[in-house]
Image: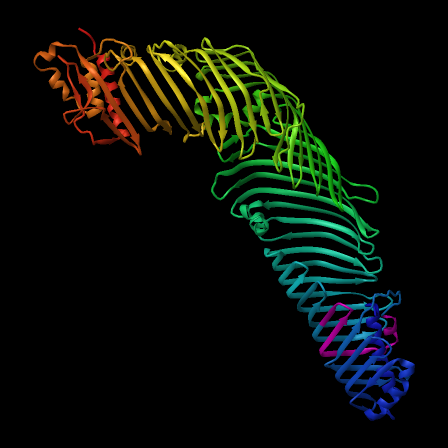
Amino acid sequence: MNKKKIALRIAVVFAVLLAVLAGLAALLQSARAVNTIAGWMEPLTGLSMHVDDISIHPPLNIRVNGLRVQTLRDRGYDLSLDRAEIHAAASAGLNIQVEKILLTGPKFTFFLKKEKSDTDPFAVLRKLPPVRLLEMKDGELELKTESSAYVLPGMDLTIRDFNPEGGGRLYGKSRFDVRTSDMAGRGSLGVSLDLSRLSPRPSGAGSLQLSLESGSFGQLKITEGKLDTQLGLSADVLRFDGASAVIRNFSRSNGSERISIQDIKTKFNLSYNQKTSGFSLTSFEASGADAGSLKGQATGTVKPGSWNATLRAFNLNLSRIFSLVNPLLPEDYRDWTFQGKGTVDLETEGRCADGSAVWKAAAVIDLSEGAFASADHTKAGERITGRMEMKLGSPEKKRKGRFTAKMTGKDGEILWGQYYQDFKGQRLAVDSQGFFETKPFSLNSSGTFDLFQTGSYAFTADLSRRRTIFSLTAQGVTCLRLFGALLQNYVTQNYPNLQDLSIEGTLDLKLTASLSPDQKVIEGDLSLQDGAALSPSNGLALSGLTIRLPYDLVLSGRTPAPPAGSRRGFMAFKELQKGRLTIGELHVPVVLSGNRFLLPEPVVVSLFGGELVIHGLRVDHLLFPDMNVEASLSISRLNLGEVIALAAPIALEGDLNGDLSPILFREGKWTAGGSLVARVFGGRITIDHLSAGRIFSPSRFFGADVAFDAIDLEEVTSNIKIGRMTGLIQGSLKNFTMEYGQPSRFDLVITSDRSRKVPQAISVDAIKNLSIISTGSETISDILNSGLNRFFSQYPYSEIGIRCTLSDDLFSLRGLIREGGKEYLIRRSTFRGIDMVNQNPDNSISFKDMSERMGRLFQQRQQSKDVPSG
């Protein structure tokens, strides 16, 4: 049974009740007689009726107890009441005038069906007699469908001055309880109506108050809602004028998480045409939770569905909005803070056709004073301003949905880890258009963007559930402006020595990224023309840099083998200067493919009067944690004098030769096989077992083993001003390790070398300085300045034997010459000289103390140089 038949059924019940009881008043004075007659009439009426008790008194005063009426053939309705009293009279023209009807405990149950009817449900009411007063106490109305139930318990209803031609006044209140498969609600309502007409269409005005204790619809839940509105009935139009609604709490669940909005307030004016199902929301205002305000309006129809609406959200408080949706954010972002102000303007229209919605919409979103910060404040942004304009049209049969989007952003400061940049005065803009589908999802987009006026950028994007393909083309990118806008502040803050660095050149880039759950791959070409880098404070100047580099790289997933015949690129420059170092024109072929970087040909660099040759450089698993490097390096005739001159003004003659092979990088550590041989100070120094790691970190380390022989002390001490010595030495430096910029472990052995005969002598200054190093004091000066010693500037010696070790920050100095229970560092000659004895052989000091001794030594030497002569 449809809703329009409900009033008809109620009217029929009352009409039958009045007509039967009035016409048979004399006969029907017992419930038994009424029930018998009702049984005879069941085949004709299709109704079953039963009363427990009935009495009729003149003129027309009727009392009925325990009445029940229900349909027989199908589930139409079921009416029962505890007690009914009717007081009426018949006029001279046999017109019935009803003074009062009192219904106690009535219960109306109707079974609703989906059938439609154009019948006027109120037409039958025109045949009823006027009723001055109708009261219903403790009634209940229940509407049922196959899956739903709508219950109004505790109904109290009063109708005064009912006139079938003119209407009447209705006052009522009731509780309600609604239960459907996806909706539930309970509360109370009150209504007041002054009806000027009942049929063919009701007309009148009044008010409605609705209080919702709790309600739910799917994942939505409302508690403590109130609606207060003026009602208007005019023919087929139902109006809600000056309506206001307040919702104490509105929440939505998403899995185990729930968002909640409190204190929502709305005002609106709404009309609904029951005949056309058209609606008009002429005004709508809403606010709540200090998140912002909404204004809008809409028109449309319910069946078939159609709409035309505008909505404006303003004074949006992003801090409050993000706190409301916080439970829906990824867990890593729930402790972040967001701030800013925004507005949203939306226009949309659409219709429902063939089971789907066809629509179009336009939206404008503005953001000002945007800011965000992570919980640890290592990522943050401030003063962000932006605007987005979008137009969308839904997919239709055999046609994809369409969209256009324009986005602009300017100013702002960004901190991301160690990266910081102030974008004041900078502008970013994106202009795109494309197509999309929803079942299954896919999106195709293309467009251009302006990145701080640095060049020309274009992109395409194809997104689907299985794969995303993104392509970028950048042309004529000005490196000077790009570096200044994106990296200048970062370099200045993190590398102060490069604060005057400038980068020049023109960059072209082609990039295609293919992203799927199994693999993420990028490929393309990089081209740089007229590149240059300049840092005057560091004496750095690179000019004529040219790069042509095709590439393909896997970012995640399986790394494929580089294809056969991978395209070659090259890197070249005209000149590189770093202080006194100058490298002339260089051209290097390179291959970057399959996460492998190769130098397919040896690279020869002329440097410091010699030559460096890099062989077979190969980097595998590039961009992955297990990245490894393999190469070989040959050095020939490298002038060490020129090399040392770059670091310190020490005159040094000699050259460096050697082969390091293989040079390997595995698990974060560099190692090198082979050795380097330096021919300096008249002898030879051999360096092997080279290793290093974390090269660009403050915790970088370096290791090597060193062996030396035939080193002429006279040449050494003429460059290192610790005092003159002559003679030859040999020895080794084993397990040398340097960490955090200072030695952390070594084992140094120095002994006399007798491979050829040379004088062996040590000056007084050298003795004093070695005494400071070994004992920390200058007590030996007393010996050197006593007696005849004060007339000698140097002494002969017969042998040197010294061992220095450093481990766990403990420095130890031992003598290797042992005679007569003593430990000598330097042994005097047979006839003359001074022994240097290790007075405390088991003593160890911290390396910090040893460094202080060395500092004192060189400080004294500097002070002596500063004393004016004469």
- 727 left or right, relative to 53: left
Q: Is residue 262 visible?
A: no
Residue 162, located in which quarter of the rendered image? bottom right
Answer with left or right where residue 565 lies relative to residue 502.
right
Question: Is 566 colored magenta in this rendering?
Answer: no
Q: Nearer the viewer, residue 537 or 109?
A: 537
Of the 4 image quadrants, the one containing the C terminus is: top left
Whether residue 693 is situated above or below residue 170 in the rendered picture: above
Q: Quadrant of the N terminus?
A: bottom right
Q: Residue 77: percent from the left, percent from the top?
A: 81, 76
Q: Is residue 391 left or right of residue 497?
A: right
Residue at x 65%, y 49% (from the top left corner): 294
> From this viewpoint, is residue 33 visible?
yes
Magenta highlight range: 122-151
Where residue 613 sits in the image (x, y, percent)?
Answer: 51, 15
Compared with 110, 481 (above or below) is above
What is the number of callouts on the image?
Answer: 0
Query: x and y percent of residue 468 in the render?
Result: 69, 38
Residue situated in front as seen by the camera: 70 or 708 = 708
Magenta region includes residue 134: yes
**Residue 553 sits in quarter:** top right
Classify 297 as above or below 445: below
Between 506 and 315, which is closer to the camera in this rendering? 506
List x then y, in percent, for residue 41.
90, 85
Q: What colour scheme does the image use?
A: rainbow
Which of 867 and 546 lies nearest the eye of the viewer? 546
Q: Does 558 appear above or below 854?
A: below
